[in-house]
Image: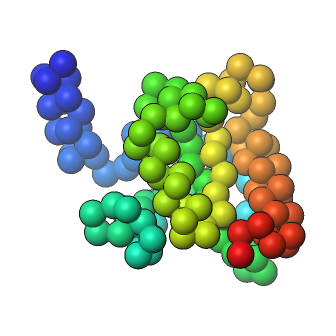
Amino acid sequence: MKSNQRFIDRATRKAERNHDAHKLDYIQSNITIPSIREEELLDSNFWTTYATRIPDLILNHKSTRPVILEHDTFKAHGELSDPNVRTQRRNEDYVRAKRPYIIINADLAKQLQLDEAKLSMYLYYHTLSQINAGVWT
């Protein structure tokens, strides 16, 4: 187990892109919403060591608040309804910081035969309706 973790750590340090970059490329190129990849967010409400988070995508239409998109898989993040501890902390950070976010669970989208880019668009507009209703204020 330790050697596998060492391999992952080394690969992560040498990586120039996120492990799921090809999946994010597909989503980013097939949605009509301007988006920013892997930009560092600073917020004192984050529980991380330096109060930073680096979301997968930030969807940012000029007339609204940015919406964070996280691309999760069962193996790395757990079930959508029962995330692992790190994923739960990430989600709690976004809620505490009042930053609207959506989660695209790749395994669930595949099981339901849903296109991840189209699902992202739907969830983005659903989140905008929540913003407009005052849920994220």
Relative height, residue 91 to residue 12 (above, below): below
Q: Is residue 8 visible?
A: yes
x 50%, y 29%: residue: 78
Residue 10: quadrant of the picture: top left
Q: Is residue 30 visible?
A: no
Relative height, residue 37 to residue 50 (above, below): above
From the top left corner, tell me how far across and down residue 82 is, in percent.
57, 31
Between 36 and 105, the residue placed more toward the observer is 105
User: Seen in the image, is 132 located left or right of residue 107?
Assistant: right
Colouring scheme applied when the structure was drawn: rainbow
The quadrant of the picture occupied by the N terminus is top left
x 52%, y 55%: residue: 92
The quadrant of the picture occupied by the C terminus is bottom right
Between 44 and 10, the residue placed more toward the observer is 44
How many numbered marks, from 0 up?
0
Relative height, residue 24 to residue 33 (above, below): above
From the top left corner, tell me how far across and down residue 80 is, in percent.
61, 33
Residue 71: quadrant of the picture: top right
User: Seen in the image, is 80 located left or right of residue 134?
Assistant: left
In the rendered image, the residue lying farthest to the bottom is: 63
x 47%, y 52%: residue: 90
From the top left corner, tell me how far across and down residue 57 is, in percent.
56, 57
User: Seen in the image, is 58 located left or right of residue 61?
Assistant: left
Relative height, residue 89 to residue 97 (above, below): above
